Amino acid sequence: MKQILLPAFAALYLASCTHNNTSENKNGSAMSSNDTLYFKNGYSDVNGIKMYYEMHGDKGDYLVLIHGGGSTLGTTFGRVIPLLAKENKVIAVELQAHGHTSDREAPESFEQDADDVARLLQILQISKAAIFGFSNGGNTAIQIAVRHPALVNKLVLASTFYKREAFPAGFFEGMKLATLSDMPEPLRNAFLKINPDSNALLTMFNKDRERMLQFRDWSDELMRSIKSPTLIISGDRDVVSAEHAVVMSKLIPNARLMILPAMHGAYIGASEVPDAGGKLHELTVAVVEDFLNKQ
C-alpha cells in the first residue's frame, strides 16, 4: 500500500498555492474582498517571461511570498495574505509556468526563479524585502539569499530542504511514477481556472517533477553563507523531516526554528491540505510577524 501511495505523496510536495477572487478594473488592478486593504495586481516582463504579482497592504516593510511547486499564489497563501497584509506590504508572486505567469523554453530551476523574483523587485523599485518561501518556494528563497543577498532583509523558510535525505525512503522512486492525475484536485482546478489550457498544466507538472528528480544536494557551506536572520518552519508530519529542519537551523547563522503539529502546508492553511481548517495559520502568522518585527 505504501508503494501505491508514493506517487500521490510525491505529487503533494510538488503541489503547494488557489487564486484570490478579485474584481479587476480596466487598469488591471483590483480591490481584494477586504476593501479596507490596498490591493493591486499586474504583470512585468522578467527575463523572458510575463511574471504575475499581487500587492496587498500599504503599511510596514515589504514581504515577498513565494508559493510552492504546482501552485498559484492563492492556494498556498490565500488564507494568510489578509493577515500578513495588515502590517506588511505584501508582494505575492507566481513563478515560471505557474498560474498567470507565462513559461519559457527552458527547464525550471530554483536559481532562475530566484533571479526572476530579484528582477521583479528591481522593476518595482524595491531594494530590500523579507522573503517568505513555502515548499519549493523556500528553495527559491534560499537562492535569493545566496545570489542576491543585498535584497534580503529577513528570510522565512517553510517546509524547505537542501538535501535529498530530507525526504522519506522511496520518495524519489515515487516521484518517477507520479502523473498529473496524482496532483491534488484543488491545485489542478486552481490552475485551470486561471489558465484553461490543459497542455500548459501538464507542462508545468512535468517541469516541476523533473526539477525535483534532477535536484542534487546543496552544500553545507551554501547554507552557512546565508547572512539574513532566518526563521525555519516545519510540521511534525511534514513531507520534509523535522530532523532536516533542525539541521538547517544549525547551519544557517542567526536562524530560529519552529516545528508545529501539522502536515505539509496545514500551518498556513494551504488549500490542498485535508485539515487546512482551524486557526493554526493564525498562530503561524503571529510568530512570523514577531520574527519580522524584531530588530
Image (cartoon, helix red, strand yellow):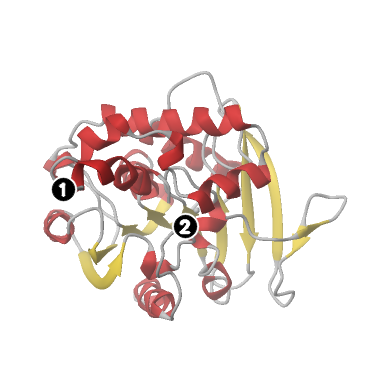
Q: Which residue is mark 2?
A: 129
Other-residue count near label 1 (Cα within 10 Å), few / some / many at <14 / 14–19 / ≥20 = few
Q: How many marks?
A: 2
Q: Which of the 4 image quarters holds residue 283?
A: bottom left
Q: Residue at x 64, y 60 (%)?
A: 20
Along the line of sight, the residue nearer the viewer: 144 or 108: 108
Q: Quadrant of the C terminus?
A: bottom left
Compared to 50, does 275 lie above or below?
A: below
Taking the image as shown, residue 219 lies to the left or right of residue 138, namely left
* Residue 57 position within the rendered picture, expressed as x and y whole percent measured from the top left: 63, 69
Q: Give the number of the mark in front: 1 or 2.
A: 1
Other-residue count near label 2 (Cα within 10 Å), few / some / many at <14 / 14–19 / ≥20 = many
Alpha carbons under labels 1 and 2: distance apart: 33 Å
Compared to 149, does 84 lie above or below?
A: below
Along the line of sight, the residue nearer the viewer: 7 or 30: 7
Q: Residue furthest front?
A: 1
Q: Residue furthest top?
A: 105
Label for residue 168? 1
